[in-house]
Image (cartoon, helix red, strand yellow):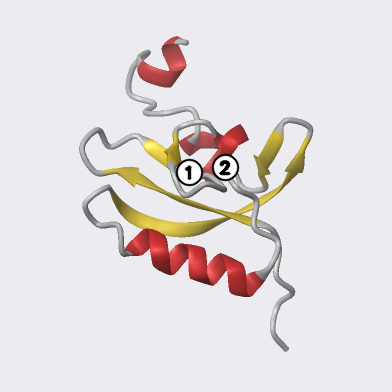
Amino acid sequence: MPRQFTPKVVTANALLEGDVVYLSADGSWTRELSRAELLTDEADAQIRLIDAQARADEVVGAYLADMEEGETGPEPTHFREDFRRTGPSNYFHGKQAS
């Protein structure tokens, strides 16, 4: 029996900087998870992912990440995605410095 589809966002790493990025509703990449498009339809999610993967000159490693609707936008349902949105863990810089 197939699993029920759960909400997702398209995420990847920016090609030049390596930062975690999310696909927004207007098709641009954002570094803020709160601005990411929350996809609730499986077919739409697959189309958005295919489009993102075709943008190899902008991002690498695009995939669908499980999320849920939060007060300020999508919120991770898994530790990995919560960890990724805060940036590198090796020292205090980037998103962690803000």
Report the residue marked by disc 1. Answer: 22
Left-right relation of 46 to 97: right
Give the numbered dot on residue 82: none
Element on which disc 1 rests: strand
Marks 2/1: CA–CA distance: 5 Å
Please give left or right for residue 18 compared with residue 85 in the image. left
To which residue does mark 2 refer? Answer: 36
Q: Are circles 2 and 1 on residues that touch, CB within 8 Å?
A: yes
Q: Residue 82 versus residue 35: which sits nearer the camera? A: 35
Give coordinates of residue 36: x percent, y percent.
57, 42
Label 1: few (<14), some (14–19) or many (≥20) C-alpha neighbours in 10 Å: many
Residue at x 39% of width, y 26% of height: 89
Q: Amino acid at mark 2?
A: Ala
- Residue 95 vs 52, above or below: the answer is above
- Above/below status of 97 relative to 2: above
Tell me the quarter of the picture where residue 15 sits.
top left
Q: Quadrant of residue 39?
A: bottom right
Residue drawn at (69%, 84%) of the image: 2
Secondary structure of the residue carrying numbered label 2: loop
Q: Amino acid at mark 1?
A: Tyr
**Left or right relative to 25: residue 16:** left
Residue at the (33%, 56%) spot, across then down: 61
Left/right of residue 96 with respect to residue 38 in the rendered view: left
Q: Is tag 2's residue or tag 1's residue first in the polypeptide sequence? A: 1
